[in-house]
């Protein structure tokens, strides 16, 4: 049983590392947006997407381990108290580190979102000042409607 408990703590450590990496990516996103560096922003978004897939895998493992440990309805705060006495201190340390990483990620992600929204609002102002109504244009790319040359048209009635 201790092996399952240790496996779960290792999973929480992996989750902490992933959240720390996501915090770094959020900071890189803020820097890329402030520097108007779309290439760097695209690269950060790709890395962020890969990290999200990694987190999904960790979540599946977490659910499996919680079921095996019989701790499905136990909150993170209660977790150390449900561990064997010899592992409670270690569990408390891991839980505290995870909470700290989670709080840092939330603040970095909020800052990145705010920065992106601010810059998108500024772009919208520029578009509006150039005489285009952003609300009336369709988002994304739309191909121009072009007629083929007359010599390429076929008369299907012939």
Image: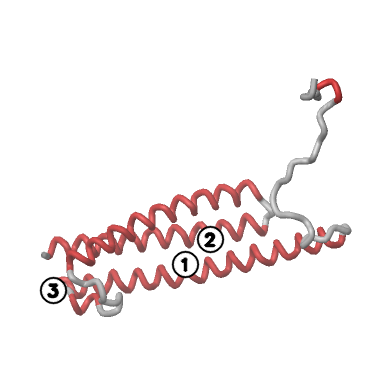
Q: Secondary structure at mark 3?
A: loop
Q: Earlier in the sequence, mark 1 or mark 3?
A: 3
Image disc number at residue 82: none
Q: Are marks 3 and 2 in contact (CB under 8 Å)?
A: no
Q: Earlier in the sequence, mark 1 or mark 2?
A: 2
Left or right position of 4 against 141: left
**For the view shown, which residue lies furthest in the right direction?**
131
Which residue in the structure is indicated by mark 3? 84
**For the view shown, which residue lies furthest in the front direction?**
157
Identify the residue at image location x=21%, y=66%. 67
Q: Position of residue 126 (x, y in %)?
A: 81, 60
Which residue in the structure is indicated by mark 1? 105
Q: Are marks 1 and 2 in contact (CB under 8 Å)?
A: yes
Which residue in the structure is indicated by mark 2? 26
Q: Is residue 107 above or below residue 124?
A: below
Q: Position of residue 43 (x, y in %)?
A: 56, 47
For the image, the number of numbered tags is 3
Distance (Cα) linking label 1 and label 3: 30 Å
Left or right position of 133 against 141: right
Distance (Cα) linking label 3 and label 2: 37 Å
């Amino acid at each position: 049983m201790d092996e399952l408990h240790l496996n779960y703590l290792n999973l929480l450590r992996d989750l902490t590392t992933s959240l720390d990496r996501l915090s770094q990516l959020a900071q890189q996103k803020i820097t890329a947006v402030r520097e108007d560096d779309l290439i760097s922003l695209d690269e950060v978004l790709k890395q962020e997407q890969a990290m999200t897939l990694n987190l999904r895998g960790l979540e599946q493992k977490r659910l499996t381990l919680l079921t095996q440990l019989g701790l499905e309805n136990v909150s993170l705060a209660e977790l150390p108290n449900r561990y064997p006495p010899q592992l409670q201190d270690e569990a408390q340390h891991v839980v505290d580190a995870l909470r700290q990483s989670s709080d840092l990620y939330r603040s970095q992600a909020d800052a990145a979102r705010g920065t992106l929204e601010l810059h998108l609002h500024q772009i919208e102002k520029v578009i509006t000042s150039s005489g285009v109504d952003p609300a009336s244009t369709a988002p994304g790319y739309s191909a121009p409607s072009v007629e083929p040359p007359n010599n390429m048209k076929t008369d299907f009635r012939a």
